[in-house]
Image (cartoon, rainbow, N blue to C red):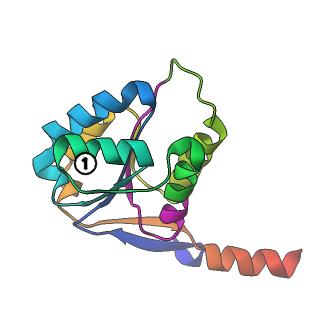
């Protein structure tokens, strides 16, 4: 795609963020327990309460950030930008209003900008975790942000 894009590689060991709204935490915990043998081979992180609950109930080590409403979604977004999160499982609750909805939308947007796989429900999580790419490297192209910044600074 030329110099406007750069190729990034998601390694064999994935950096997976685990996030769930309150009404979906039990579902995510059950999903993690069912997929424990796969998940134990990857680095796991998540928003505060969800991370703690997954660790307590499954024994999987999950690095916890702040709770979503207290900035955890933004911390995960920053880790995407830093290249330290490359896969998201986010069991969201589409039927309950969330006070931190702008943070969730920002997280989803940054995942799209950086071409990060993101599952929003059990079905998409099941498809993703059983994909052949879970055990392989995966190359994907994103915008060459350094080139973009340079060009913008020269034209503004």
Q: From the viewer's perspective, tell me whether residue 88 is left or right of residue 136.
A: right
Structural crowding at the residue carrying mark 1, measured as other residues with C-alpha within 10 Å and reported as few (<14), some (14–19) or many (≥20)? some
The image quarter in which residue 53 lies: top left
Q: Secondary structure at mark 1?
A: helix
Instruction: State whether residue 141 is above or below residue 103.
Output: below
- Left or right of 13? Residue 145 is right
Q: Residue at x 43, y 48 (%)?
A: 48
- In the rendered image, the residue lying farthest to the left is 37
Residue 57 or residue 9, whichever sits in front: 57
Look at the image and tell me whether residue 89 can be seen: no
Residue 139 is a magenta residue: no
- Report the number of discs: 1
Of all residues, the one furthest to the top in this rendering is: 95
Residue at 58% x, 51% y: name it: 71
Q: Position of residue 19 (x, y in %)?
A: 41, 43
Magenta range is: 78-93
Extreme-right residue of the structure:
156
- The quadrant in which residue 134 appears is bottom left
Residue 11's x, y, as percent?
Answer: 28, 69
Report which quarter residue 103 is drawn in.
Answer: top right
61 lies left or right of 6: left
Above or below — where is 145 with respect to 105?
below
**What residue appears at the point 16 percent right and 56 percent down from the top-left corner?**
40
Relative to the observer, which residue lies in front, 89 or 20? 20
**In the image, residue 99 lies at what x, y percent?**
63, 31
Residue highlighted by disc 1: 55
Q: Quadrant of the C terminus?
A: bottom right
Q: Position of residue 151 (x, y in %)?
A: 76, 78
Q: Is residue 100 above or below residue 135?
A: above
Left or right for 33, reference 80: left
């Amino acid at each position: 795609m030329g110099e406007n894009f750069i190729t990034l590689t998601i390694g064999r060991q994935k950096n997976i963020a685990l996030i769930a709204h309150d009404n979906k935490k039990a579902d995510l915990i059950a999903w993690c327990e069912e997929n424990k043998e796969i998940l134990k081979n990857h680095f796991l992180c998540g928003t505060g309460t969800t991370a703690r609950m997954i660790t307590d109930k499954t024994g999987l080590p999950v690095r916890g950030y702040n709770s979503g409403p207290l900035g955890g979604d933004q911390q995960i977004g920053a880790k995407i930008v830093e290249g330290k999160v490359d896969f998201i499982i986010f069991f969201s609750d589409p039927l309950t209003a969330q006070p931190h909805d702008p943070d969730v939308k920002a997280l989803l947007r940054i995942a799209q900008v950086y071409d990060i796989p993101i599952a929003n429900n059990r079905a998409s999580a099941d498809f993703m975790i059983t994909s052949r790419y879970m055990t392989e490297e995966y190359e994907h192209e994103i915008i060459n942000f350094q080139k973009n910044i340079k060009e913008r600074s020269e034209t503004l």
